[in-house]
Amino acid sequence: MLAEFCLVKKMAINFYMKLLLAFYCFSWLFSLTIAQSDDPNLPFKAVNLGGWLVAEGWMKPSLFQNIPNSDLLDGTQVQFKSTMLNKYISTENGGGTILVANRASASGWETFRLWRVNESSFNLRVFNKQFVGLDNQGQGSNVVAVSKAPKALETFQIVRKDDDPNRVCIKAPNGFFLQAKSESLVTADYGGSLDWGDQNPSVFRMEIVRTLKGEFQVTNGYGPNKAPQIMRDHWNSYIVEDDFIFMSQNGLNAVRIPVGWWIKYDQTPPKPFVGGSLQALDNAFTWAQKHNMKVIVDLHAVPGSQNGNEHSGTRDGYLEWGDSNIDETVSVIDFVAERYSRYSSLAAIEFMNEPDASGVTIDNLSKYYKAAYDAVRKHTSSAYVILSNRLGDARSNEFLSLANGLDRSVIDVHYYNLFSEEFEKMNVQENIDYIYNKRSAQLQEVTSTNGVLSFVGEWTAEWLVKEQTTIEDYQKFAKAQLDVYGKATFGWAYWSYKNVNNHWSLKWMIENNYIRL
Ligand SMILES: *[C@@H]1O[C@H](CO)[C@@H](O)[C@H](O)[C@H]1NC(C)=O
Ligand SMILES: *[C@@H]1O[C@H](CO)[C@@H](O)[C@H](O)[C@H]1NC(C)=O
């Protein structure tokens, strides 16, 4: 209201009055800024407890290492090249009809995403999202990609050659092997011997082009008998109370904890997820309370997946979160807010990590953000709410006006000098300059004077520098980021606390004097 007053009046008065008024408006903004940050905990110096309640294989490979056929987890993208024809199997039109074997090179239509039934049986999902299967209730030998939901007729066994595991035969549910007799058709009627010879039409070279290692993959990979114990052991050992002691003694005052939507179901989540992560989150709140830390709960994985990345709980990498998932996703936020609003260590709830602009629209996301906000405010007026900006082709201020209408709201941005070609050629100094110039300007764009706070919810001191680097280079890079991200009004959170890749582990970086807070 005051801002409007300033505007209307401005037009009617002379230059000197304008100056005075400008000063008045400025000081009003200034006092607002003071008022909004009178929270003594802000800005937070936080760390992400990544890889804990939402598994990520690259952060802790050992969690995945005992899975049988561990290179064929859910979402693994494979291509099959006939050894006889020297051509790839392709889904005509990307799906909806037959398979052929006539492509000299492979891309989308020649790529199949695995849904793992067990260690040797799989459904194969094609480009247009149908599943490969037998038609005519399996009466004939025709292979098509038409089913939207895989059942027995869409389940194939991948038989690997013992001494050459990427040489495979594919057994169809009718008991016969797939064969590419000619380039124009793939059928399920090979009943000959399994001689593994190049001229055998049922022999294929399987090329693995992408793998996923997230919570879905690890739980379904171990299966319902082994996964519960393995996940419980991981949750109980990866983060313990001593870690909260270490964090609080080293200048951190908050943790951002990624959680998955299944946490709401506690002991009985939908398969393949297993129960128990809620108990681990309870422990985190208890330890945080005891050691004067705050907790930011971050819904990192939502039903349907908001970005297709392994940390979104996806099965096969397709981004499918949308309007139809909003109610269930809000119910997870409602559950978290209700359960943890009684803890004074609850700092904030983040509604959705890294929605990707390629599939999550502003409309759907805005609708969700508003509903999630209402759900939180039913239970607490003091917790902050965090709205994540979208990845990809999205304006950095696209949610500022929405956030403006919400009380105690924060915009989350993630800054990595990674994942993009522009960083591949940068040397040490260029990376550091990028932080002081570009990142600083970007952060200003989302640091509003209207009460919405800014949060660099993920960053790290790893980069793509190819030249020989020293510890001092890393120290300078980390310091540049601390300098710049320290101006975020809500604070920052390093990715991550623990990680087998040392520079991604804040614990390691602190213990080895790369970073001092
Ligand atoms: C895997 O699943 C298939 C299809 O349901 C079944 O026939 C097979 O026996 C299972 N194999 C193992 C090793 O459990
Ligand atoms: C919202 O999400 C649905 C999927 O649930 C999608 O089909 C639709 O295009 C999206 N619409 C808008 C306007 O964002």
Image (cartoon, rainbow, N blue to C red):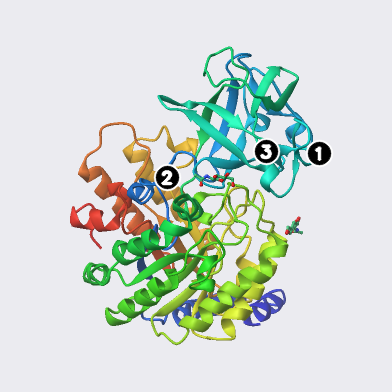
Please name the residue shown 25% across and 58% down the image: 507
10 Å neighbourhood of mark 3: few (<14), some, or many (≥20)? many
Work out whether 40 lies above or below 467: below
Instruction: Give the Cα separation between the discs numbered 3 and 2.
Output: 33 Å
Q: In this orientation, which residue lies closer to the viewer: 74 or 15?
A: 74
The numbered mark, 3 or 2, whose residue comes first in the sequence reads 3
Q: Residue furthest right?
A: 136
Residue type beneath disc 2: Asn
Q: In this orientation, which residue lies closer to the viewer: 266 or 180?
A: 180
Left or right: where 176 falls relative to 383: right
Which residue carries the number 3 mark?
A: 126
Left or right: where 181 falls relative to 277: right
Q: Quadrant of the N terminus?
A: bottom right
| Contact, mark 3 vs mark 1 (Cβ under 8 Å) | no
Please name the residue shown 61% across and 61% down the image: 303
Find residue 495 and report its image quarter.
bottom left
Q: In this orientation, which residue lies closer to the viewer: 10 or 17?
A: 10
Q: How many marks?
A: 3
> Residue 203 in the image: x percent, y percent?
57, 21
Which residue carries the number 2 mark?
A: 417
